[in-house]
Image: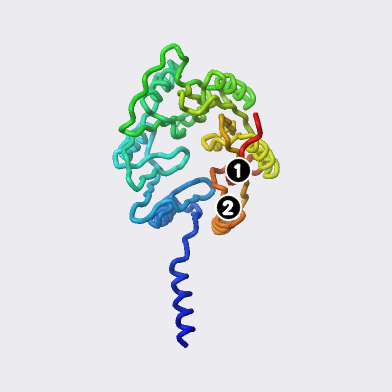
């Protein structure tokens, strides 16, 4: 009898200390319900890792030192949204790139936000304007579209910096801090990227093209300690098999997917003087509960979700979750 009691107590103890799953997945509902679900998991130590078709969180903190989130919906036009961002930044919230929600860290710092001036929107000194923001310590965090009563939606690029950031010394005679590669086709843009990379520039962020229907990216002049020079390639999505085969081939040669480039074309791969190589995996799971099981399964050991990729057909649009894993040393360049 005592033996059975001891076994029952041991089973109960094991059940109480069972480890929490590494990943949790929230299916988007209306903004308030989604935010409430995300914050409920954040209270347990989870942090938002990927947003898209679903919100993926990973265990990264220990209560009571946890993350906190707030939404960004319905904040008016560009000026009103910028003012609201700065108000939230003063309370420790920041806007992670492409996240769609603001995050406060367990030990928060303060942030401020800026957009290029109106002269930038009129095409005057646009590169100097953005270079000035970057030299002041700002980094791009996203592009937002605002609806207008008349005409096309207004595009605005937002930049963020920590309040304690130290402005960089302005470069003299070394080229602009920021350059933009703009074109109608991905191949054209990437040829310009290659030219700039040879001049010690590094991919920074997508950029709203100045050409109707075009695509563009921003590059930043590299410091001595940035790890360059860098090489770049790009890829598109046709189907899952093609995507995995192509990325695995590039990953074995030391090219990594740039997460900031996943939402908009061209989707960019970057290689530096590194000893790392990468393996990739694509998950096409529609239901949140099933995706959570997949992410926590042993088959995904070592793989980390880095973002969603979209494939748009004539009648359909699919989104695939991309995962990355660091593996052995790459093949020789």
Q: Position of residue 91 (x, y in %)?
A: 29, 42
Q: Residue at x 64, y 25 (%)?
A: 187
Checking the image for residue 1, the label placed there is none
Q: Position of residue 327 (x, y in %)?
A: 60, 43
Residue denoted by label 1? 327
Give the quarter of the image for residue 314.
Answer: top right
What is the secondary structure assignment of the residue under circle 2? Answer: loop
Q: Is residue 84 above or below residue 286?
A: above
Q: Position of residue 55 (x, y in %)?
A: 49, 50
Who comes first in sequence, dot 2 or dot 1? Answer: 2
Mark 2 against mark 1, which lies toward the viewer? 1
Q: Report how far apart the C-alphas of labels 2 and 1 lie in the structure.
A: 12 Å
Residue denoted by label 2? 301
Is residue 40 shown to the viewer in this render?
Answer: yes
Tag 2–tag 1 contact (CB < 8 Å) = no
Q: Is residue 96 above or below residue 195?
A: below
Judge the density around disc 2: few (<14), some (14-19), many (≥20) Cα neighbours within 10 Å.
few
Is residue 314 shown to the viewer in this render?
Answer: no
Q: Residue at x 43, y 39 (%)?
A: 96
């Amino acid at each position: 009898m005592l033996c059975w009691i001891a076994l029952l107590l041991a089973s109960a103890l094991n059940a109480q200390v069972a480890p929490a799953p590494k990943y949790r997945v929230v299916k988007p509902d209306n903004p308030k319900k989604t935010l409430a679900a995300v914050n409920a998991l954040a209270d347990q130590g989870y942090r938002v890792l990927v947003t898209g078709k679903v919100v993926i969180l990973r265990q990264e903190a220990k209560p009571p030192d946890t993350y906190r989130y707030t939404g960004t919906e319905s904040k008016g036009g560009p000026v009103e949204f910028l003012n609201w961002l700065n108000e939230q930044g003063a309370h420790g919230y920041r806007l992670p790139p492409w996240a769609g929600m603001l995050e406060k860290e367990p030990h928060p710092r303060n942030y401020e936000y800026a957009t290029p001036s109106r002269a930038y929107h009129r095409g005057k000194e646009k590169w100097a304007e953005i270079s000035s923001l970057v030299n002041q310590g700002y980094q791009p965090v996203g592009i937002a579209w605002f609806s207008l009563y008349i005409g096309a939606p207004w595009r605005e690029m937002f930049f963020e910096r920590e309040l304690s950031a130290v402005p960089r010394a302005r470069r003299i005679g070394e080229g602009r801090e920021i350059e933009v590669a703009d074109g109608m086709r991905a191949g054209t843009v990437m040829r310009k990227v290659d030219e700039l990379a040879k001049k010690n520039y590094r991919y920074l962020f997508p950029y709203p093209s100045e050409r109707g229907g075009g695509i563009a990216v921003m590059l930043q002049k590299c410091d001595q300690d940035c790890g360059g020079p860098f090489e770049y390639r790009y890829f598109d999505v046709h189907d899952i098999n093609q995507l995995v085969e192509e990325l695995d081939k590039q990953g074995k040669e030391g090219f990594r997917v740039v997460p900031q480039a996943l939402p908009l074309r061209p989707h960019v791969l970057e290689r530096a003087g590194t000893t790392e190589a990468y393996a990739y995996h694509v998950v096409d799971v529609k239901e949140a509960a099933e995706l959570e099981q997949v992410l926590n399964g042993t088959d995904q050991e070592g793989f980390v979700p880095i973002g969603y990729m979209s494939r748009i057909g004539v009648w359909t649009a699919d989104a695939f979750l991309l995962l990355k894993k660091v593996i052995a040393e790459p093949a020789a360049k």
